[in-house]
Amino acid sequence: MSASPHSAKNNAGRTPRVFRPVAVTALAAALVTGAAAPALATVDGKAVPKAAAGQDRPELQKTIQAIVDAGFLGVQARVNDERGEWVGSAGQRKLGTNAKPPANGHFRIGSSTKPFVATLVLQLVARGKIKLDAPVADYLPQFKLDRRITVRMLLQHTSGLYNYTGEFRPDGSVEPGIPATGKEWADVRFKTYQPEELVRFGLSKELRFTPGEKWSYSNTGYTLAQLLIEKVTGHSIAEEMKRRILGPLKLRGTVLPGASPELPRPHPHGYFRYQDDAGQWKVIDVTRQNPSMTAAAGDMISTTQDLATFYSALNGGKLLPAKLLAEMRKTHPKSAGPFGGYGLGTYVQDMGPNCGTVLHHNGSTAGGYVSVMYGTPDGKKTLTASITYGDAAPDLAEAFPKARDNLLKQVFCDEQTGPANEAEPTSSP
């Protein structure tokens, strides 16, 4: 999931929590943080010399530490820019321990999955297997979809399809979807969902608007995209993703887990805080959870290194022809908000005269994890990170936004005083 860039009334599937359970992209995207450490942790948890990370950048370490100080359990972050590569971590790997999160640990990326899926669909468009503006019903007739809904609309959240993880009503209240928040989700976090089941739940609700007329974040559309990929290729999305993206880019730390609750080692632990039936606050370790509740809308596992490699390759033109990369960045006018506009599986945001344009798609899971993925249009600069929740409620009103904005300015602005966006997008699994 990932946090959303717009207000509750304008965003489908947003829950009252700052990080929407599955379809968030703005807040989570903004979640980049910092930590300070004299040495960096490697994948095996051992310290390596500072020089191995490319350079010592105490300002970045200080900023990620500020994210931890805002109430999060831990952060691992990676920056690739003209100065080289910097990697750092801050906070705790697990409650009750002093060890920092592994600097290239595995984590659940939530809605940062969507750019991978959108890229895969567009690769199939390039090969003539899918037509971007064809009715989805032509490929998946079993769902009897409105013929006005096109493949493009699935990727751009303009289909009008109800978001199966929940929607905001016009008055701001929430119409629940499948269990995706609070004790309700905690109780069923190991439940297995089938993609068809999720889609049919979304289709059991009326269209939220005429297809193509508005914008509303919908995990239903991306789960349909998964079924579309599988239909036209005859293979599972995991097989196609490995063959077309993960294999060629050697993304060995990236996994499509299906219904498996396991998280490859090494990894930081993620926690979930909720109120029980008696109103008492409980904290549980949700490192193990069944990600099938979001399918291709947000189930992937990755590392900061793999996310950086993928986003650099995508934006650098190595995965898509120039024409389709341009389509990916063509935003819908109704998607405009504080985190930019939404194209096909990516946000496009102008951060100001000293910062320029950045592309991003962050994510968050129903519990435990937030992912951050930013890059410049030429693919030469990236910021990727993982943020984990602990047993405290983070300060999302002041401390975190300040730390987040500082991090974005340091990475993407020419001057520290450059105007970074006041708020950034994301969603959860």
Image (spheres, grey):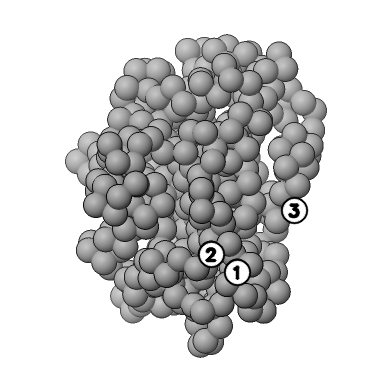
Q: Which residue is mark 1?
A: 51
Q: Tell me where residue 315 sits by quadrant.
A: top right
Residue drawn 41% across the image and 52% down it: 411
Q: In front here: 20 or 379?
A: 379
Q: Are marks 2 and 1 in contact (CB under 8 Å)?
A: yes
Q: Please, what secondary structure does the residue beneath circle 1 have?
A: helix
Q: Which residue is mark 2?
A: 55
Please indicate, yes or no, whether residue 246 appears anywhere in the rendered image. Answer: yes
The residue carrying pointer 1 sits among few (fewer than 14), some (14 to 19) or many (20 or more) residues within 10 Å by Cα, namely: few
Task: Name the kind of residue labelled 2 in the image.
Answer: Gln
Secondary structure under badge 3? loop
- Number of marks present in the image shown: 3
Q: Say which label, 2 or 3, has the lower sequence index.
A: 2
In this view, the residue in front, 13 or 350, is 350
Q: Badge 2: how crowded within 10 Å, few (<14), some, or many (20+)?
A: some
Please provide percent x and percent y for residue 84.
Answer: 56, 54
Distance from the alpha carbon under mark 3 to that under mark 1: 24 Å
What is the C-alpha distance between the residues marked 2 and 3?
Answer: 25 Å
Which quadrant of the structure image shows residue 275?
A: bottom left
Residue 189, placed above or below residue 102: above
- Look at mark 3 in the image and give the residue it sits on: 252
Residue 376, compared with residue 106, is above or below; it is: above
x and y percentages locating residue 293 in the rendered image: 56, 50
Residue 183, percent across and down?
A: 43, 66
Identify the residue shown where x is 72% and y is 30%: 230
Asked if residue 49 lies left or right of residue 385, the reply is right
What separation in Å lies between label 2 and label 1 (alpha carbons)? 6 Å
Which amino acid, mark 3? Answer: Arg
Residue 177 at least partly seen: no
Q: For the residues labelled 3 and 1, say whether their Cβ atoms are less than 8 Å apart.
A: no
